[in-house]
Image (spheres, rainbow, N blue to C red):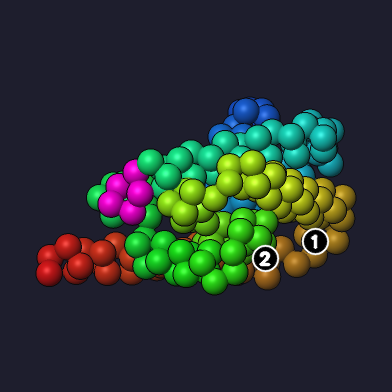
Amino acid sequence: MALTEFLIKYITDFISQGGYAIIAVLMALESMVAPVPSEAVMPFAGFLISEGRFTFELVILASTIGSITGSLISYYAGAYGGRPFIERFGKYFFLDLHDLELTERFFKRYGEGTIFVSRFIPVIRHLISIPAGIGRMNILKFSLYTLIGAALWNAFLAYVGYSLRNNWQEVLKYTEVLDIIVIAVIASVLAFFVYKHLKNGKKTTK
């Protein structure tokens, strides 16, 4: 079995065994500061939709509930803990202060509409709820923008997975190329985390 096929089987089996609840949990983590990208969850949920093990409606419902739950937790962490809380405890949640500062500037520059737009932007979507909480953005607006943005993004990724699975025989023709891409991505992610760890280590020793 090729590496790509093995990973797909492993991840889809994991999500299938956990059911809709695991999708909600993973997407809640994704909407906070945990390194769980939606791109590594929702397409595989789409695979399971194609196989008849999940339904599209419940996948979107579970993932969106998870997204808004995680976003609200981050919002209130910002609202009641403020920046000092994030600076003190953020490292335990894999929070990079540089990324938070970038997100704060993004939020201040483009306003409340960024809550919707940020669902489609890597890194920003993990952190945008914190400056929204620090700025005490209207909670109803925050929840509505998050709900719509998350539902659309989650639905798009699930549909991508669904379409890939339905055309899997065509995809398999390029298995070797996919394996190379997967290995390159894994190596890049590992290198990134090593770099971040070393970078943060140097900061703490200064």
Q: Nearer the viewer, residue 192 or 13?
A: 192
The alpha-carbon separation of the residues under discs 1 and 2 comes to: 9 Å
**Residue in view at x 62 percent, y 51 percent:** 38
**Residue in view at x 46 percent, y 64 percent:** 104
Residue that label 1 marks: 171
Q: Nearer the viewer, residue 6 or 13?
A: 13
Does residue 198 appear to the left or right of 45 in the view shown?
A: left
The kind of secondary structure the magenta stretch mainly shows is helix
The vertical placement of 6 against 56, above or below, is below
Mark sitting earlier along the chain (1/2): 1
Q: Which residues are magenta?
A: 81-85
> For the residue labelled by badge 2, is the local secondary structure a helix, a strand or a loop?
helix
Q: Amino acid at mark 2?
A: Leu
Q: Nearer the viewer, residue 183 or 100?
A: 100
- Residue 189 location in percent, x, y? 46, 63
Q: Amino acid at mark 1?
A: Val
- Find residue 118 and report its image quarter: bottom right
Residue that label 2 marks: 178
